[in-house]
Amino acid sequence: MIQWERPVFSSPFELWKEEGVLFLVLQPGATMKMQDMKEVIRLIAALDRTGKAPVFLEYPGNFAVQPGARDLLRRVCGAHGHPVAFYTTDAVGRQQGEYFKEVQRPAFPFRVFQLRDQAYAWTRERLQLVELLS
């Protein structure tokens, strides 16, 4: 009998592009390591050659990002200008998002949202701005 085994390659995220917006959904309880962050950055670059598509980041409770991975993301997003809507319903996650915004002072537009509809509306507004300025 074949026994189920966990996949060899497990990822702490899902990423796709829909209607001009990049959706990055993080897995609850996972940790984003440097290797994972490099993969996210590579995939974002492949999905958006302009480097301007807004990112809808869904941040679940109990998710961790290693400090070096966070710094790498800040540098790369700052260079490309991807606006980021940080959506979370988790109080601790919201504190982490606000802390990132205040302490890291990202060079790209970054907002923290508690409501999905508001976060999505903001990403659509950023997309319209990019289209108007192109």
Image (cartoon, helix red, strand yellow):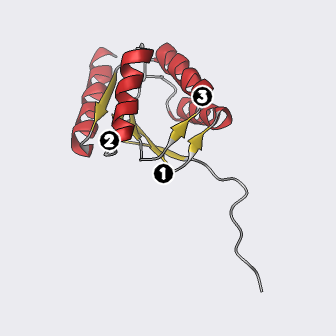
Q: Which residue is mark 1?
A: 28
Indicate which disc, 3 or 1, sits on the residue closer to the N terminus: 1
Q: Which residue is mark 2?
A: 91
The C terminus is located in which quarter?
Answer: top left
Q: Is residue 84 above or below residue 62?
A: above
Closer to the eye: label 2 or 1: 2
Numbered disc 2: secondary structure: helix
Residues at circles 3 and 1 in contact by the CB criterion of under 8 Å: no
Residue 108, quarter of picture: top left
Observer-nearest of 54 and 93: 93
Q: Which residue is mark 3?
A: 69
Observer-nearest of 67 and 35: 67
Q: Is residue 49 visible?
A: yes
Give residue 106's position: percent from left, percent from top: 42, 16
Circle 2: is it few (<14), some (14-19), or many (20+) Cα within 10 Å? few
Residue type, label 1: Pro
Q: Residue furthest right?
A: 1
Give residue 74's position: percent from left, percent from top: 50, 20
Q: Residue 17, labelled with which disc?
A: none
Residue type, label 3: Ala
Residue 101, quarter of picture: top left
Residue appearing at x 40%, y 31% in the figure: 96
Circle 3: is it few (<14), some (14-19), or many (20+) Cα within 10 Å? some
Q: Is residue 7 above or below residue 117?
A: below
Numbered disc 3: secondary structure: helix
Residues at circles 3 and 2 in contact by the CB criterion of under 8 Å: no
